[in-house]
Amino acid sequence: MKHGCCCISSILTLHTISSNRAGTVPSELGMMTQLTLLAIRGYVGGRKVHGPVPSELGKLTKLQRLGISKNDVTGTFPTELFLLTELKSFDALETLNSGTLPTQFGLLSSLNYVMVAETQVTGPLPTELGNLKLLSWLILRGNDFTGSVPSEIGAMESLQEMSFSGSSLTSSLPTELEQMDRLYRLDFADNKLTGSVPAFNSSSITSIRLSGNSFSGPIPSSLGLLTTLEKLDLAYNLLTSSIPPELGNLSSLRGACLQNNFLNGSLPVQLVGLQMLETWNSANNELSGEVPIQYSLQWPNITAFNVSGNELLVCSNPTGFCQLNNESLCCPPESINGIC
């Protein structure tokens, strides 16, 4: 491996990158007690380090950033790592680490960034994660967790981004998530979650992604209060009832994915308020009635509009839908089913 470092006599940072020679993470790194950054990162086309993460890294008491991403490191995370109380960033993306997510993560009170993504980590999410009051980014996607999301996560008062997509989580989302007012991106797509869609109350949230679960019941009308929201993805769930007209208040919304649910009723004319909208997909539901012609006149940025697989009609002025840049909407004046 190649090593890039600064000031050998009193090393403060060490950046280790993969090369054409594979090997293990050397336990001797634990002797470099002045390290503040240690990044061991594999790259596409390069050979990767393998084997376990050595427990000797727990001697690096001044370490603030630790990254082992895109390598073939295996085994559980050694408990000694959780003695690194100065650690602010922990990055383990696309590794072969296994075992459970240690409860000792909750001891690292200085953490600001955690990524343990696309690994072989299993087991329940530790409730001790709620102790990480300074954490801004929690990215745990692509794992094989068991059980539900602990309510203690709602106590992470600094959290801005939360990603658990594709992680086999079950049960409903805790109501405590609704009050996380600094959250700007939330992703629980492709899990096994049930219950209702939470009534999120963040004043800064820009993206909600809950597709590919088994959420049921209506879309909360209170989502219309999230005026910073740019993307809403509730596709491939079991949602019922009508589309709330309050969604027309989402003045920043650029993309809405509501397809493959059981939504019924008509498309609300109030959606004309979505002046920033670029894509809309509510295909394969049970929607009926006419598509409001106002959409074609008041959505200046629309590039994709899909409402196929419903019982919708275009009657009043169908040629107006040519302005939606979708030729399938430039239809003759008779009633048609499944436009787009």
Image: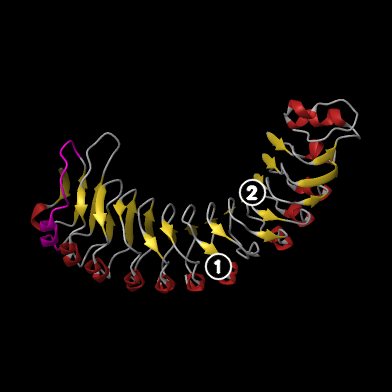
Number of numbered tags placed on the structure image: 2
Q: Secondary structure at mark 2?
A: loop
Q: Marks 1/2: CA distance?
A: 23 Å
| Residue occupying the point 54% across, 61% down | 183
Place residue 279 in its image quadrant. Answer: top right
Q: Is residue 91 left or right of residue 143?
A: left
| Residue occupying the point 12% across, 57% down | 27
What residue did someone put label 1 on?
180
| Residue 24 covered by magenta stretch | yes
What residue did someone put label 2 on?
235
Q: Residues within 10 Å of mark 1 (few under 14, many from 20)?
A: many
Q: State whether residue 15 appears in this view.
A: no
Q: Secondary structure at mark 1?
A: loop
Range of the magenta residues?
19-33
- Relative to residue 30, is residue 312 depicted above or below? above
Mark nearest the camera among 1 and 2 is 2
Residue 14: give x, y in percent of width and height: 19, 52
Location of the N terminus by quadrant is top left
Residue 28: give x, y in percent of width and height: 10, 57
Q: Is residue 208 left or right of residue 93?
A: right
| Residue occupying the point 58% across, 50% down | 212
